[in-house]
Image (cartoon, helix red, strand yellow):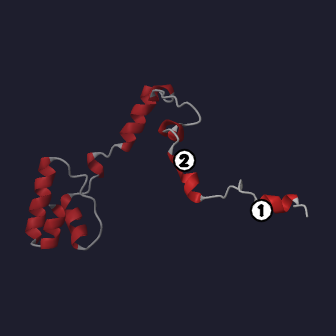
Amino acid sequence: MGCSNADHFWTSGSLRVFNFDDDEDEVLHEPVDFMFKSSEDSCVLPIHSFISKICLNFVLAAAKPSKKDIPPIEVTIQRLLKGQKSSLFEYRNLKDKISLLEAALESKDGNLILMVI
């Protein structure tokens, strides 16, 4: 009795079984440069090739907060006492930080003092 091709396929020892572990080994042995290399070469251009220096200065000046945009310390303290969110990031110089701490100490609110510190 002759074996059909289908029977021979299933009974032959040359059958290779898919194994997830084998696939991971192949990926791990690839060079790192190949895995993280971009398909296109990246090109770094100076910012002035996209925008003129004058326009860049206008954009940077508009994005920079001015002193008039910073709320008075008393307003910030009142917001914090009411539980409202208020940023202390604007108070960067030493004079503003000392004034903010003094206002927090005058309020005699421990939570506010800790927030300011």
* Type of amino acid under label 2: Val
Towards the viewer: 34 or 84: 34
Provide the secondary structure element on which disc 2 rests.
helix
| Residue appearing at x 49%, y 30% in the figure | 51
Q: Earlier in the sequence, mark 1 or mark 2?
A: 1
- In the image, residue 33 sits, relative to residue 100, either above or below, namely above
- In the image, residue 66 sits, relative to residue 107, either above or below, namely above
Q: Position of residue 102 (x, y in %)?
A: 9, 61
Q: Residue furthest right?
A: 1
**Residue at which label 1 appears:** 10
How many numbered discs, if any? 2
**Residue at which label 2 appears:** 27
| Residue appearing at x 55%, y 37% in the figure | 38
Q: Residues within 10 Å of mark 2 (few under 14, many from 20)?
A: few
Q: Residue furthest front?
A: 1
Q: CA distance from mark 1 to mark 2?
A: 29 Å
Is the N terminus in the top left, top right, bottom left or bottom right quadrant?
bottom right
On residue 51, which mark appears?
none
In-image side of 70 versus 4 (left or right): left
Q: Position of residue 48 (x, y in %)?
A: 46, 26
